[in-house]
Amino acid sequence: MSSTWSLQTPRTMGAIAIVQLEGKNTLKSITGRDNWQLGKMRLVNIPEVDEVIAVQLQENTALIMLHGGMQVLREFESRCTSLDISKVDDTVYIEASNAIEQSILQALSVAQSEDAIDLLLSQREKLQNAIPTDEDVARSARLDHLIHAPKVVILGKPNTGKSTLMNALTREQTSIVHHLPGATRDAVGARINCAGLVVDIYDLPGFRQSADTIEQEAIAIAKTIYEESDLVLSIADIEHEWLAQTKNLAILVGTKSDLGTREDADVHVCATTGEGIPELAACIRETLVPQADVLNDRPWFFTGYKPTDE
Ligand SMILES: Nc1nc2c(ncn2[C@@H]2O[C@H](COP(=O)(O)OP(=O)(O)OP(=O)(O)O)[C@@H](O)[C@H]2O)c(=O)[nH]1
Ligand SMILES: [Mg+2]
């Protein structure tokens, strides 16, 4: 078995950094100490790296707790490289008894929406020897939005109230609002909770012809975000028409409902008073992750799922 290490804590400044070591004698080779008793913590000095707390958890698995500074981590990393201990990105969960449990624990560690937790925990038995149908694949892709925050873009003609809507959804002054069209120059993004579903929402500048090269550049970036989006909130008020768009998952949002409502909108909002905002949030959630999918008894073949090796 080869020697590997993986970082268990985020790769950023912190009080401690926890590293998991795999492989026979990996802890011995990195600390230079022998006779590790299973489960017994020791304070050891790794020369020119750090004074660390280390524990051998199982015959082939150990943990090292370093101080969490970036320089310490860099020193540790180069020490591992010089000892031929390679870095792996996937955490090995010693409590997992098979590949399915391993992938469930991995997904739990990155899941963004709370609803993912119970659903992932209920997949252990369901996934045993399960073979996905086409319908399972489609439903599983929708449920994956509970793990990885989907991208939602607000798209519409200038001055239709996109930024005001963005601020109502984020409950903060995230975007500049102005009575003159063209107020939003750059795409503005924020992570929000939409009726239990965590999404990344982007307020895009109104796509329009402009002689200003900087504005054209900003619109080009916004178009890329639009292309990558999972859902479009297509915006129009009573004065402006919908912007032509080609995404098949879209909600038609009629804004400025205090000034009049559009017959052809799916949802009506008045972002200045907050009217219709909870309904829009519920609609976003239901469109991306329908409740029927959450309640469905079939297995969820989430991204990263590995069939059991038993
Ligand atoms: N009456 C009313 N006015 C609104 C509402 N929402 C936005 N407005 C006004 O509409 C104008 C444009 O609002 P913005 O949110 O800046 O519009 P936008 O679509 O982001 O505009 P650009 O960034 O220029 O494309 C501002 O004067 C807002 O105060 C609303 O619900 N009711
Ligand atoms: Mg704007």
Image (cartoon, rainbow, N blue to C red):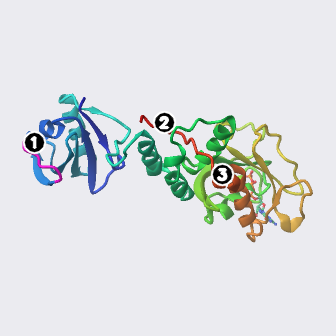
At a point 90% along the width and 64% down the height, the residue shown is 260
Q: Position of residue 67 (x, y in %)?
A: 22, 52
Question: Distance from label 1 to label 2 (Cα)?
Answer: 42 Å
| Dot 1 amino acid type | Pro
Viewer-closest of 187 and 57: 57
Report the side of 96 relative to 24 (left or right). right
Circle 2/circle 3 CB separation < 8 Å:
no
| Dot 3 amino acid type | Asn
Circle 1/circle 2 CB separation < 8 Å:
no
Q: Is mark 1 on a helix, strand or loop?
A: loop
Circle 1/circle 3 CB separation < 8 Å:
no
Q: Name the residue under label 3.
A: 296
Q: What element carries label 3?
A: loop
At a point 87% along the width and 51% down the height, the residue shown is 240
> In the rendered image of this protein, does residue 218 appear above or below residue 105?
above
Viewer-closest of 276 and 256: 276
Crowd tier of the residue under label 1, counting other residues whose Cα lies within 10 Å: few below 14, some 14–19, many 20 or above: few
At a point 77% along the width and 52% down the height, the residue shown is 181
Q: Mark 2 points at which residue?
A: 307
Report the span colored magenta. Answer: 34-39
Nearest to N terminus: mark 2 or mark 3? 3
Give yes or no for residue 261 being in the magenta stretch: no
Q: Is mark 2 on a helix, strand or loop?
A: loop
Q: Residue furthest bottom?
A: 273
Report the side of 181 relative to 126 (left or right). right
**Label annotation for residue 138:** none
Indicate which label's residue lies in the foreground, 1 or 2.
2
At a point 15% along the width and 36% down the height, the residue shown is 25
